Image (tube, rainbow, N blue to C red):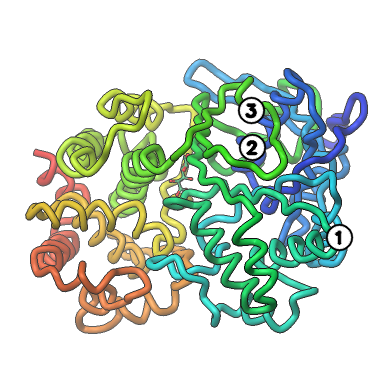
């Protein structure tokens, strides 16, 4: 592919208005194209300074092509490529943290957005409180001018703005967490109070942290995707991303200093996003995790492969109808049964190769909001949700590190060591359920829940995932 020219920018880069932390595939398939289209349609200086908190990978791929890249919409009928021009620059925080903080204090930057995954918030997954003993938080409290965590950077940036008498930027989280804006507000103000109570008080009264619901399925880009694009488009784009046709972004109103005209391109602004968030986290992410663990154990590589296996399709339908929808309020403008039908069509998109292994990552950070809250709501109504209990049991099998053929699983999770130790005891279910950063004591005190998980765990070991799913769905 070396003889193929690299994609390059035509015209000049947009003037920056947003700083974004976490320039991974989801950002490049979601916030960045949406902002690009809003600027192209309605104008505004909302170019994006993207900041990588870890590796230089995104910068190294984007810089040689002037930060321009292709977002490839992949539907069952083929690919539709779109050029995205919204990124003005990519910075690599560990190379020069002071430069990132200085940029956050530039009056032109009015929004700091984030896609840093659930674990990036250094919070207790269950209570949402800042983890003061998290190694990155300990580091940042001791070195507030040279932070490594997103939280440390946001507080340092807000501090620099306050010193310059600038209004705070709006902090816009785009990660799959319930009431995600409230959660970031909580961890940011807790951190700020530790270093300077007056700063903490200013952030509490003046800063804005709107909640958001974000949705677009974005599988990891493969080298084959890059080659295929090069052959069809005639240019090399090492930062290309693949995404499904569907997208939905619901944002709470209340920014400190404006935002791009996202409404012009279909973003929904609402006064309270909670019902949308719960619908999406429980219906989509909940069944995604169910298919990821149980599908992986049954030997399926992708979500589309898993739902092509009839019992797994039936499992999703029964989880939605029997266990998830009864816990939800209908958000304005939505129809829950129709929403679930469209989810199944999205999962079945054969062109999207979304790996079960990719979704299975970081389960300790995902389970509480995707699965455990729904279980607790059903238990409160006196019903034991056996399907979701099977999912919890499937996750415990998965983090045990061996699939049903005895092959090793590459388990990725910030708690991987404790999970491995727990699953190697005589009572793996008891030891995992005792991990109180994941499971609320009220939940594990419910005998119906514990029995259902134990029974499902034993059956999975005896009969395998496919048979257990088929038995449940029949
Ligand atoms: C997935 C999500 O990887 C995962 O855990 O469940 O990334 C999912 O694809 C998105 O939330 C869809 O909007």
Give the left or right position of residue 367, taking residue 175 as reference: left
Question: Could you say which is closer to the camera, residue 437 or residue 180?
Answer: 180
Residue that carries the numbered disc 1 in the rendered image: 164
Assign a secondary structure to mark 2: helix
Q: Residue at x 42, y 27 (%)?
A: 349
Within-10-Å neighbours for mark 1: few <14, some 14–19, many 20+: few
Mark 2 and mark 3 residues within 8 Å of each other at the beta carbon: no
Sequence-wise, which precedes: disc 3 or disc 1? 1
Sequence-wise, which precedes: disc 1 or disc 2? 2
Q: CA distance from mark 3 to mark 1?
A: 29 Å
Q: Residue at x 48, y 40 (%)?
A: 213
Q: Which mark is residue 282?
A: none
Q: Which mark is residue 262?
A: 3
Q: Residue at x 65, y 61 (%)?
A: 203
**Disc 2 residue lies near ligand 1 with CB under 8 A:** no
Above or below, comparing residue 57 to residue 420 in the picture: above
Quarter assignment of residue 236: top right
Instruction: Name the image quarter holding the C terminus.
Output: top left
Assign a secondary structure to mark 1: loop
Q: How many marks?
A: 3
Horizontal and vertical percent position of residue 19? 75, 48
**Disc 1 residue lies near ligand 1 with CB under 8 A:** no
Quarter assignment of residue 338: top left
Mark 1 and mark 2 residues within 8 Å of each other at the beta carbon: no
Give the left or right position of residue 150, taking residue 48 as reference: left
Q: Residue at x 30, y 24 (%)?
A: 335
Residue that carries the numbered disc 2 in the rendered image: 31
Above or below, comparing residue 230 to residue 100 in the picture: above
């Amino acid at each position: 592919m070396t003889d193929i020219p690299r994609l390059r920018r035509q015209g000049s880069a947009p003037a920056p208005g947003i700083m974004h932390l976490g320039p991974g595939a989801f950002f490049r398939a979601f916030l960045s194209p949406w902002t690009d289209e809003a600027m192209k349609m309605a104008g505004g200086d909302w170019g994006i300074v993207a900041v990588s908190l870890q590796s230089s990978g995104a910068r190294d791929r984007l810089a040689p092509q002037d930060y321009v890249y292709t977002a490839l919409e992949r539907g069952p009928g083929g690919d539709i490529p779109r050029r995205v021009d919204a990124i003005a620059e990519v910075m690599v925080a560990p190379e020069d943290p002071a430069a990132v903080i200085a940029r956050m204090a530039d009056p032109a930057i009015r929004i700091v957005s984030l896609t840093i995954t659930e674990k990036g918030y250094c919070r207790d997954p269950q209570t949402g409180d800042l983890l003061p003993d998290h190694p990155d938080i300990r580091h940042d409290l001791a070195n507030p001018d040279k932070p490594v965590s997103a939280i440390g950077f946001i507080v340092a940036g807000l501090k620099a703005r306050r010193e310059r008498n600038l209004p705070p930027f709006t902090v816009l989280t785009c990660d799959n967490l319930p009431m995600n804006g409230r959660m970031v507000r909580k961890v940011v103000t807790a951190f700020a109070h530790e270093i300077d109570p007056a700063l903490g008080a200013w952030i509490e009264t003046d800063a804005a942290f709107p909640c958001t619901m974000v949705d677009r399925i974005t599988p990891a880009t493969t080298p084959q995707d890059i080659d295929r694009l090069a052959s069809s488009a005639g240019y090399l784009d090492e930062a290309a991303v693949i995404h499904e046709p569907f997208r939905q972004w619901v944002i709470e109103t209340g920014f400190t200093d404006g935002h791009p005209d996202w409404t012009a391109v279909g973003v929904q602004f609402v006064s309270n996003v909670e019902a949308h968030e719960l619908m999406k986290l429980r219906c989509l992410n909940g069944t995604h995790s169910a298919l990821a663990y149980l599908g992986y154990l049954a030997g399926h590589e992708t979500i589309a492969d898993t739902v092509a296996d009839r019992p797994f399709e039936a499992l999703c339908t029964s989880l939605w109808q029997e266990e998830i929808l009864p816990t939800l309020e209908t958000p304005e403008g939505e129809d829950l049964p129709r929403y679930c039908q469209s989810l199944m069509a999205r999962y079945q998109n054969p062109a999207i190769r979304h790996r079960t292994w990719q979704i299975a990552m970081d389960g300790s950070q995902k389970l509480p909001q995707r699965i455990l809250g729904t279980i607790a709501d059903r238990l409160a109504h006196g019903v034991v949700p056996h399907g979701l209990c099977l999912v919890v049991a499937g996750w415990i099998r998965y983090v045990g590190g061996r699939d049903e053929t005895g092959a090793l699983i590459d388990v990725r999770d910030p708690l991987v060591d404790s999970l491995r130790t727990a699953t190697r005891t005589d009572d793996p279910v008891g030891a995992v359920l005792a991990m109180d950063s994941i499971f609320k004591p009220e939940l594990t005190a419910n005998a119906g829940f514990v029995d259902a998980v134990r029974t499902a765990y034993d059956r999975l070991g005896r009969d395998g995932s496919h048979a257990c799913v088929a038995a449940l769905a029949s």
